[in-house]
Image (cartoon, rainbow, N blue to C red):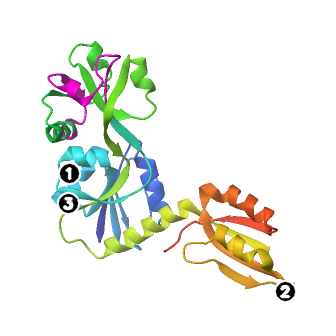
Amino acid sequence: MLRVAVPNKGALSEPASQMLREAGYRQRRDSRELVLTDVENDVEFFFLRPRDVAVYVGAGTVDVGITGRDLLLDSGADAVEHRSLGFARSTFRFAAPKNQCHSLADVTGKRVATAYDGLVRSYLAEKRIEAKVVHLDGAVESSVQLGIADLIADVVETGSTLRAAGLEVFADPILSSEAVLIRGNRELPASLDILDRRIEGVLVARQYVMLDYDCPEENLKEAVKLTPGLLSPTVSPLHDEGWCAVRAMVKREATNRVMDALYSLGARGILVTPILACRI
């Protein structure tokens, strides 16, 4: 039975469970439930603190898990990223009081407050920057004002919290993070392949829609250029001569632009259908 760690709270929790539901797995209905066995799919889910997921995966207690790339790297666990999952994106950056720091070199000799001290220490060592890292469990924005740090390193989404604290980002991002599926550095059960294919199917389904339309045969070549599909579109003759039906997957974000272009070519009956799951 495949053992999977899932974040039990925070920004990663609900999107991770939703992805697993879309992939056909049972998920908990009560937030107090810590273990759930999906007998039909031969998977056991363990709902753990997001920061602990990589530790359990690295120790071999569970086979795979969902966590943030930043949490994986900060943990130092013997685990590796298996697949990016496309949600909970964020950027990890340095921030300091306005006009005090402008480049990474300005961090030298400073005190850096962060909840990700493992990640920051590794980054500074890689860049050969000597600085003191101050570990805090949260609310690092207040550390400069309270005098225990000169700058911070933290997850930045909109930057509004930093601005409210009188801080501004500087230097290149330390890391671009998102939710990832992680695994240990060891032989894994074959059932991981099934989980991986299902998740890939969800990711593709979220990116594409199915587009159906009727097209004059004289304009089919141009229409197919607009809707090439993943491999090739399906084209079938209609009862009325000179017309054919076309079906193809198109990028969700481009749907309306493609529909407009097809209409201009003379296509009619243009229909869009969501894709709930797929195997590519």
Query: From the viewer's perspective, is 87 left or right of 122?
Result: right
Residue 33 seen in the figure: no
Which is more foreground, mark 3 or mark 1? 1
Residue ID for mark 2: 239
The picture quadrant where one finds residue 107 is top left
Residue ID for mark 3: 61
Which of the pair 147/5 is nearer the observer?
147
Inter-mark Cα distance, 3 to 2: 61 Å
Going from the N terminus, do you reach mark 3 or mark 2 first? 3
Place of residue 118 in the rendered image (x, y in percent of width and height, measured from the top left): 18, 40
Q: Is residue 87 magenta?
A: no
Residue ID for mark 1: 55
Assign a secondary structure to mark 1. helix
Amino acid under disc 3: Thr
Residue appearing at x 79%, y 66% in the figure: 265
Inter-mark Cα distance, 1 to 2: 62 Å
Residue appearing at x 45%, y 25% in the figure: 160
Which is more foreground, mark 3 or mark 2? 2
Which of the pair 111/258 is nearer the observer?
258
**Label 1, residues with CA under 10 Å away: few <14, some 14-19, many ≥20:** many
Query: From the viewer's perspective, is 76 left or right of 95?
Result: left
The picture quadrant where one finds residue 133 is top left
Q: Is residue 123 above or below residue 273?
A: above
Q: Is residue 105 magenta?
A: yes
Place of residue 140 in the rendered image (x, y in percent of width and height, measured from the top left): 29, 25
**Label 2, residues with CA under 10 Å away: few <14, some 14-19, many ≥20:** few
Which stretch is magenta?
A: 94-119
Assign a secondary structure to mark 3. loop
Q: Is residue 155 above or below residue 134?
A: below
Label drawn at residue 184: none
Assign a secondary structure to mark 2. loop
